Structure formats: C-alpha cells, structure tokens
Amino acid sequence: MNLPNKLSMLRIGLTFVIIVILLFPFSAMGITVPQIFVNESIVVDIRYPIAGVLFIIASVTDFIDGYIARKYNLITDFGKMMDAIADKVLNNSILIILCAQGFIHPIIPVVIILRDTIVNSIKMVAGNKGHVVAAIKTGKYKTASMMVGIVLTLFYNMPFELWNIHVADFLLIIAAVLSIISGVQYYQLNKKYIFEGGI
C-alpha cells in the first residue's frame, strides 16, 4: 500500500463523507442545517459548500497520486484499478445526488455514466488482448469541464449566479457533449481490438 494507493483510498473515503453530508436526513433527525443568505435572493444550504470543499480536496488527491506514481515509479495494477474506481465513485456519485436533488438535469449523469461504462468496457477488452488504451485530449477536457462544473454547482454557481450567468450548467453540458465525442473517438480508435478475431 504505497502513497499513491493510500491517496486513492483517501479519495474514496472523502466521497463517502460527501455522500453522508448531502444525503443524511438532518431535518428528520431534528437537526437544523445552517443557511446563508446571499444578496437577499439566494439561500445557500451550508452542506453544499462543505461538500464542495471536500470535493476539491478529493480531486486534488487524484492529480497528486498520479504525479507521485509516475515520478517515483510506483505504478501498480492495484493502484491503476483503485485510481479508476475512486474517480468514478467520486464523480458519478456526486452527479447522481445533484440530479436527484434537482440541481442538474438527468441527461447529464446519464450521458456521462453511460459513456464511462462503454469506454471502460473498451479498455477492458483491449487490455485483455494486450493493448493499452491511451487517454485522449477530449476525454481530459471532458473531465476538467465536469469537475469544475460540479464544484461550481456545489457552491451554488457563485459568484456567477449574482449576475444570472449559468456557468455551472454550461460546463456540465459541455462535459456531456465531450463525453459523447470522446466516447465515439475511443470506439473508433479501438474498434479493431473489439472485433479482433471476429464476432
């Protein structure tokens, strides 16, 4: 259990803390959740900014563990698996919760999660045949757009909401579009491995 792997496990742990913060029935337990009033028109449930801070910390660990693993040659099969799981657990869980609580449109998590499922399946098939599926730029842009969009959503799209500019929604829509584009690109680049040996 090297440092990058510990960071991946930390990311999973932070994800479950975020899930509890956002889904725990505080009102049913008689616990009043503090609220912040912004500009006399925006009511901020404090749980979401707290979740936003934890999401940023978890996202930073994703960058750090990959950097450390590459720099110090600590890349392991377990590490690659846990890193991928931690990423999907973090991002997909938050997208589903934000959708269920009415912050984002259902099409966003549906498209992103469906794309991830297909791309991961392509990577698995290619890997079983000894081929490594490299990351592509559109996939990286999709991830960056999605993560910034999630952070802004958790922070109630501040400060852009003050000027009625829906930056968070725009970034998540871009992420969904890039999900489709990158998914098609992954298929085109690796379909030879999928159909290798016939159907």
Image (spheres, grey):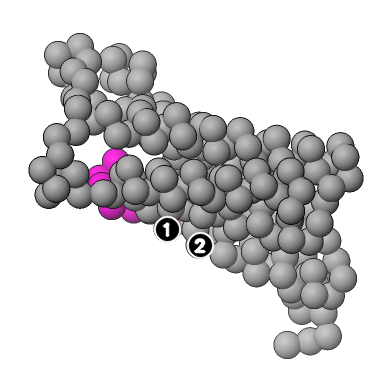
Q: CA distance from mark 2 to mark 1?
A: 6 Å
Q: Residues within 10 Å of mark 2 (few under 14, many from 20)?
A: some
Q: Position of residue 42 (x, y in %)?
A: 20, 21
Q: From this viewpoint, which residue is outermost toward the front? A: 1
Q: Nearer the viewer, residue 95 or 114?
A: 95
In the image, taking residue 141 as reference, residue 111 lies left or right, namely left
The C terminus lies in which quarter of the figure? bottom right
Q: Position of residue 94 (x, y in %)?
A: 41, 47
Badge 2 element: helix
**Residue under pointer 1:** 110
* Residue at the image position 28 percent from the left and 15 percent from the top: 162
Q: Is residue 172 magenta?
A: no
- Looking at numbered disc 1 in the image, what kind of residue is underneath it? Val
Q: Which residues are magenta?
A: 100-110
Q: Is residue 109 magenta?
A: yes
Badge 1 element: helix
Q: Tags 2 and 1 in contact by the CB under 8 Å rule?
A: yes
Q: Is residue 106 visible?
A: yes
**Residue under pointer 2:** 114
Q: Position of residue 113 (x, y in %)?
A: 49, 58
Q: Which mark is residue 174?
A: none
Q: Nearer the viewer, residue 87 or 174?
A: 87
* Residue at the image position 55 percent from the left and 59 percent from the top: 115
In the image, taking residue 108 as reference, residue 28 lies left or right, namely left
